[in-house]
Image (cartoon, rainbow, N blue to C red):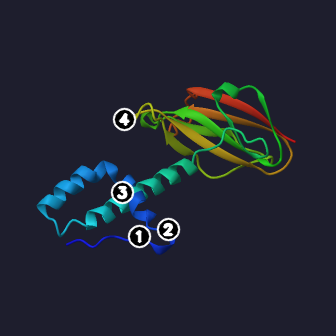
């Protein structure tokens, strides 16, 4: 015989109701398993709650890594190929993200041809974000280059889209951005 669950004394027994709502999609499977093995299936609710909380944690972690387009009181400013040839103005409390379309399966990569002077500082190697529209192998993605601001001034960033092992070949595409930090 099952014991009634009284919940945690501090939440007035509402924890059980919250758990049931979270596990509603799995309820038919749990009922079926209980009819087959009535004594050994109480742990399924705990496993379901653990699975739901793990999925929630992964979703929160994934969402926290998404970059902001622009934040009015500082933060990150994102530029894309559409900004090429323009001058981007930044305040000293902002950072810079450069998002460039890429397809790593072809071997082509973006490289920073004009190395940053002392105005912008590259924050490590570029990250590659898969394009959600093309979920298969070999699908295009986006290279994300992150820069911090070292001092006020003007800097030109030039990116070449090329095969890294063919240093003599002309790049498939070139982009230039001029950044002014005020």
Q: Earlier in the sequence, mark 3 or mark 1?
A: 1
Quadrant of res 162? top right
Q: Which residue is mark 1?
A: 7
Label 2 to label 4, Cα distance in Å? 45 Å
Q: Earlier in the sequence, mark 2 or mark 4?
A: 2
Dot 4: within a 10 Å radius of its alpha carbon, few (fewer than 14), some, or many (20 or more) residues? few
Q: Position of residue 91 (x, y in %)?
A: 83, 43
Residue 11 disc label = 2
Dot 1: within a 10 Å radius of its alpha carbon, few (fewer than 14), some, or many (20 or more) residues? few
User: Marks 4 and 1: CB-CB under 8 Å?
Assistant: no
Give the SS element for disc 3.
helix
Q: Which residue is mark 4?
A: 136
Label 1 to label 2, Cα distance in Å? 7 Å
Label 3 to label 4, Cα distance in Å? 36 Å
Label 3 to label 2, Cα distance in Å? 15 Å
Q: Which residue is mark 3?
A: 20
Which of labels 2 and 4 is toward the front?
A: 2
Q: Position of residue 177 (x, y in %)?
A: 73, 32
Q: Quadrant of the N terminus?
A: bottom left
Residue at the location (70% across, 47% down)? 147
Q: Position of residue 161 (x, y in %)?
A: 57, 32
Q: Earlier in the sequence, mark 3 or mark 2?
A: 2
Dot 2: within a 10 Å radius of its alpha carbon, few (fewer than 14), some, or many (20 or more) residues? few
User: Marks 1 and 2: CB-CB under 8 Å?
Assistant: yes
Which of labels 3 and 4 is toward the front?
A: 3
Residue at the location (59% across, 26% down)? 173
Q: Earlier in the sequence, mark 4 or mark 1?
A: 1
Q: Position of residue 45 (x, y in %)?
A: 30, 62
Residue at the location (49% across, 68% down)? 11
Residue that sits furthest to the left in the current view: 36
């Amino acid at each position: 015989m099952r014991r009634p669950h009284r919940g945690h004394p501090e939440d007035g027994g509402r924890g059980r109701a919250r758990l049931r709502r979270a596990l509603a999609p799995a309820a038919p499977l749990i009922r079926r398993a209980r009819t087959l093995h009535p004594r050994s299936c109480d742990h399924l609710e705990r496993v379901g709650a653990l699975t739901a909380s793990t999925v929630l944690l992964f979703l929160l972690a994934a969402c926290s890594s998404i970059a902001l387009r622009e934040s009015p009181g500082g933060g990150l400013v994102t530029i894309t190929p559409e900004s090429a040839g323009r001058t981007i103005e930044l305040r000293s409390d902002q950072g810079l993200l450069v998002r460039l379309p890429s397809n790593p399966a072809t071997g082509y990569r973006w490289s920073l041809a004009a190395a940053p002077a002392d105005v912008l500082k590259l924050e490590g190697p570029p990250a590659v974000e898969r394009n959600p529209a093309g979920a298969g192998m070999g699908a295009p993605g986006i290279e994300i280059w992150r820069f911090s601001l070292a001092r006020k001034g003007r800097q030109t960033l030039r990116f070449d889209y090329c095969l890294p092992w063919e240093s003599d070949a002309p790049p498939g595409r070139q982009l230039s951005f001029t950044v002014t930090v005020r």
